[in-house]
Amino acid sequence: MRFVMSGDLCLSEAIQGGFFVLLMRAKNIEYSIGDRQILSIPEIAIHEGEKIGLVGKNGQGKTLLFRYLMEDLDVRPQVEWMTSVSWLKQLSEEMEKASYSGGEKTLHRLKKVFEESRHLLLLDEPTNNLDFKHVEELERKLIAHQGSMLIASHDRMLLNQVCTKIWELDQGTITVYSGNYSFYEKQKEIERKQQNEKYQQYSDEKKRLKQRMKQKHDQSKGMRKPPKRMGNSEWQLGKNKAAAKQKKVERVSKTLERRLDRLEKVDKPFEWDEVKMSFEQGDAVHHKYLCQFREESISRNGRKLLDIPQASLPNKARVALIGNNGSGKTTLLNDLIHQPERFPNQVDVAYFNQNLESLPIESTVFDYASESSPLSESMVRIILARLRFYEQDMNKRIAVLSGGERVKLALARLLTRRAQLMILDEPTNHLDFEAIQALEQLVLDYPGAVLYVTHDRTFIQKTADRLWVIESGVLQDFEGTWEDWTNRHQQREAAEDAVYDQLTLENRLTELIGKLSMPTPKDDPIQLEEEYQRTLKQLRSFKS
């Protein structure tokens, strides 16, 4: 297990400085499925006050680690518990098929966990299917929790707000980063740059050794022939001397070859392909807006879901549609894709949702992504590579792909279609951080407009330049980023609180004036006068 600390804090100092009460320790964590070893962790521990985020690519074994610690696997774990613990299991497909919605099911299970009032919380994807309101409520509860916790979550903002330590699970082992998620991201970037430098050094040395070997090989080869100006008789006399020199050159060549064989291989880090997707001139849309709403409403089964006083979808914009569960987001998207008359004639609309049952499971990755695409084969392969489908994946059948891989492939097919508008309904579900970050870059590079629904606040912050926000049954069109919106929201709430506080002070001032003008025997005129002056001073500061 490797440790990466923030600042100048070392591990022993961190433990002595407050994280000294041991709550859980697990040793010799080993677990395999068939021939594949999933977990191989010498030791992990959770101490008092630690709020730990567990991250890693899909399939690395995060849920398996929870199950191992809670003795929910077919092995006997070496785990010591020194406190009470609550475990929130990840919402399974069977749970999602219950009569309640996924969000309601998650809220019910979270309520039960908090009611148990255990000191240590193990939370596996606690934000699944929750809308922004409930995710923010959960954040506040986790920040206020006086105990410790281990959280596996795809919500980067929650991990950043709540966690003080990150465990990265990769290739069966844990690397510890002592800081929040932002610290973890910065350290990963530093590691990537260091890896790039090591690879460059390795590549340069390998190239140098090969060039030297070629030089020696050419030199040795040339020694076998007499020089052009030397006759055969002279060559025969100096042949033995030349043979000795040749052997020396060949020994040097062998030494270089051994050095090349012993050179420690360094893998090349992944780099984004610096290729921007672009429309040909004939595909471009020369309209300022792709669609607009004016004094409209959206209804279903005779029930009005939301009003839209005014909203615009600009050409080439990245628009995030946000709102609580059940507010009408998906209904609005469905209305848009089934009303082509809303768009200019030449606008092609591509749509993605999480219903992947219609994928042709016998088709291959490349064939499905490239079918009917106007893009070149190389561009299709670049898009697939940016979603982590490499050369060895091109001929894989869709039938053998995981759920997350099928989501990525469906998104790749949309990207290769080169539509002027992409509509995405929850595209980040089932994707790990690496895939989400790849999708963020693809959305930013996409040459057309993108309208999407997601519960991933970090994805919105990094990609959206416009928000359609549904609140209290009304859609508001906001030109700005997620950060702009939250800042405006906070200012509005602060202003409302100030108005409330001012009214409270004015009412109290009126009450004190009444008591001072007609005090009862129980009233102390001096205390009343002092309180009156304090209240008057506070009220004046509010008004100023």
Image (spheres, rainbow, N blue to C red):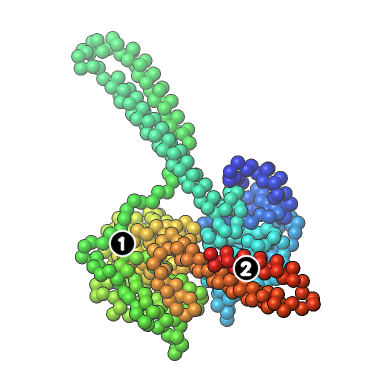
Instruction: Name the N-terminal-most of marks 2 and 1.
Output: 1
Provide residue 327's location: percent of width, then percent of height: 48, 78
- Residue 185 in sight here: yes
Q: From what the image shows, is residue 88 above or below residue 215?
A: below
Q: Nearer the viewer, residue 479 or 454?
A: 479
Q: Secondary structure at mark 1?
A: loop
Picture residue at 32% right of the left edge, 15% below the top: 242
> Residue 74: which numbered mark, if any?
none
Picture residue at 22% right of the left edge, 13% below the top: 230
Provide residue 152's location: percent of width, then percent of height: 58, 60
Picture residue at 60% right of the left edge, 56% below the top: 163
Q: Secondary structure at mark 2?
A: helix
Q: Residues within 10 Å of mark 2 (few under 14, many from 20)?
A: some
Type of amino acid at the residue the image marks with label 1? Pro
Provide residue 357's location: percent of width, then percent of height: 44, 73
* CB within 8 Å, label 2 to label 1: no
> Mark 2 or mark 1: which is in front?
2
Q: Is residue 79 left or right of residue 229?
A: right
Which residue in the structure is indicated by mark 1? 447
For residue 419, which quarter of the picture? bottom left
Q: Is residue 192 left or right of residue 249?
A: right
Which residue in the structure is indicated by mark 2? 536
Q: Residues within 10 Å of mark 1 (few under 14, many from 20)?
A: many
Type of amino acid at the residue the image marks with label 2? Leu
For residue 142, which quarter of the picture? bottom right
Q: Is residue 154 left or right of residue 242?
A: right
Picture residue at 31% right of the left edge, 22% below the top: 219
Q: CA distance from mark 2 to mark 1?
A: 59 Å
- Residue 75 in sight here: no
Q: Is residue 238 left or right of residue 526?
A: left
Provide residue 195's location: percent of width, then percent of height: 47, 42
Q: Residue furthest bottom?
A: 302
